[in-house]
Amino acid sequence: MVRLFLCAGLVAVAATAGCGARNDDAACRCTPDNHARTRRPDGSVRDGAALLAELRRHQRDVAMQRPARDIKLVDDELRLAVSELCQPCSWVGDRMTIEAMFPMERLDDATAAVCMGLVLRDGTTAWGDTRPRCK
């Protein structure tokens, strides 16, 4: 019985610490630039509309059950693009999936993409699961 209380207590402390860290972290004070600094191979600069098109392509590739390796290569390129849009914030991890960064179920309602979010037709932004939640 004592072990049960100790385990429950440790879980509660860990959960509370994780929630507090997510809100109080320096990530909450960071504001992403939401624009690319580098040019794409064709000379253009990736903007929110171009990123949205690439996210839609990712969704089509997954739906068509393209080979996992092909999807991973595109995902890696997208992750780098999103990382650039998120500068100076370091929110994008090496192993994040596109589905964790963006609310892909809202893709049809989107008009553009920003750092870990989709700008919807009504002007609101739907954020991905891994974007820091700040007060």
Image (cartoon, rainbow, N blue to C red):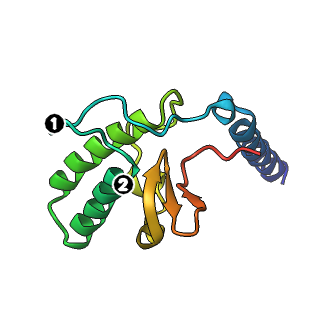
Question: Label 2, on which residue?
Answer: 49
Residue 118 sits above or below residue 81 on the image: below
Residue 58 image-quadrant placement: bottom left
Quadrant for the N terminus in the image: bottom right
| Picture coordinates of residue 17, whole percent (x, y) | 75, 39
Question: Of residues 73 and 3, which is closer to you in this image?
Answer: 73
Question: Label 1, on which residue?
Answer: 41
In the figure, is residue 12 to the left or right of 109?
Answer: right
| Picture coordinates of residue 28, whole percent (x, y) | 68, 36
Quadrant for the C terminus in the image: top right
Disc 2 marks a residue whose amino acid type is: Ala
Q: Are marks 1 and 2 in contact (CB under 8 Å)?
A: no
Residue 93 visible in the displayed image = no
Mark-to-mark CA distance, 1 and 2: 17 Å
| Picture coordinates of residue 126, whole percent (x, y) | 56, 60
Residue 47 image-quadrant placement: top left
Q: Residue at x 22, y 37 (%)?
A: 40
Task: Label 2: state its secondary structure.
Answer: helix
Question: Of residues 135 and 53, which is closer to you in this image?
Answer: 53
Residue 105 visible in the displayed image = yes
In the figure, is residue 118 to the left or right of 11?
Answer: left
| Picture coordinates of residue 120, whole percent (x, y) | 52, 65
Which one is earlier in the sequence, the residue at label 1 or at label 2?
1
Disc 1 marks a residue whose amino acid type is: Pro
